[in-house]
Amino acid sequence: MNLSDLAANMLHQQRSTPDLIADALREAILQGIFQEGQSLRQDEIATQFGVSRIPVREALKQLEAEGLVTLHLNRGAMVSVLTAAEAQEICEIRSALELKAMQLAIPKLSTPDIEKAAVVLEASDQTTDAGTLAKLNWEFHATLYASAERPRLLTMIKNLHVNCDRYVRVQMVQMDYQERSQKEHYQLLDACRQQDVKAAIRLLKRHIDTAGEQLVIYLQQKAQKR
């Protein structure tokens, strides 16, 4: 799949043009169609979507706010590069926010919530596609956090996930990582099912910390090869 395919898929949706372009560009970055450090030419993107440069600029500003794109005054836009130090900070923030969301959500989790999360995990067991696994990973966590009824908090958490998503997809290819992550997901779901707040918080913290440590190591090794 390339940007043209993503553009065609997105433009069928009934949403504002900048949002649709942002969705397509975001997916292109997460899939690796656009690599870190790569220049994003507004005129070429506008041509692909058959629009003026104005909605493209608005879309790029959205992605800049999400940390996926860096805008330079005279050099235009480029795909952001995530450093090991930035990844460490993101995971530390994730831990603080997600533990709070989990704490607020557990007392309100319903049987349908638990069942929906279980279905997501079962779907994860049936695929090895990194992109699908990354999306299901977010869906699982979002399903558990939604009961916290903190939409701003959930949006902040989602943006942090998006920041790391393209690198997590690389990790997902490593089956030992996916198997361990999935095992931790099932343990977390069981704690939520029992409404054991302390166990859920402990498991979630370990889950985020372990993933963060592996991501930092991956980015450090990647930087050394440059």
Image: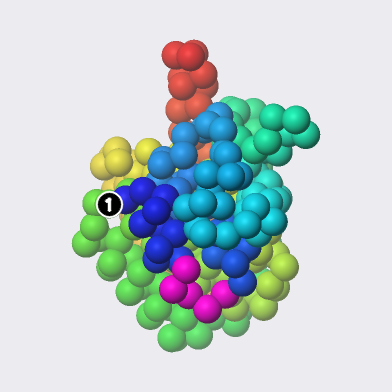
> What residue is drawn where x is 47% and y is 80%?
113
Residue 122 left/right relative to 92: left
> What residue is drawn where x is 30% and y is 41%?
173
Q: Which residue is mark 1?
A: 129
Residue 1 left/right relative to 185: left
In the image, residue 176 sits, relative to residue 3, either above or below, namely above
Q: Between 223 and 45, which is closer to the camera in this rendering?
A: 45
In the image, residue 6 sits, relative to residue 181, either above or below, namely below
Q: Position of residue 190 (x, y in %)?
A: 41, 68
> What residue is drawn where x is 21% and y is 62%?
126
In magenta, the rendered stretch is 11-15
Q: Between 168 and 5, which is closer to the camera in this rendering?
A: 5
Q: Which image quadrant for residue 120?
A: bottom left
Question: Is 12 within the magenta?
Answer: yes
Residue 218 left/right relative to 95: left
> What residue is drawn where x is 60% and y is 44%?
42
Instruction: Indicate the secondary structure of the residue bearing disc 1.
Output: loop
Q: Which image quadrant for residue 119?
A: bottom left
Query: Could you tell me if residue 180 is visible in this image?
Result: no
Q: Position of residue 136 (x, y in %)?
A: 39, 62
In the image, residue 122 sits, relative to residue 128, either above or below, namely below
Q: Between 32 and 146, which is closer to the camera in this rendering?
A: 32
Query: Could you tell me if residue 129 is visible in this image?
Result: yes
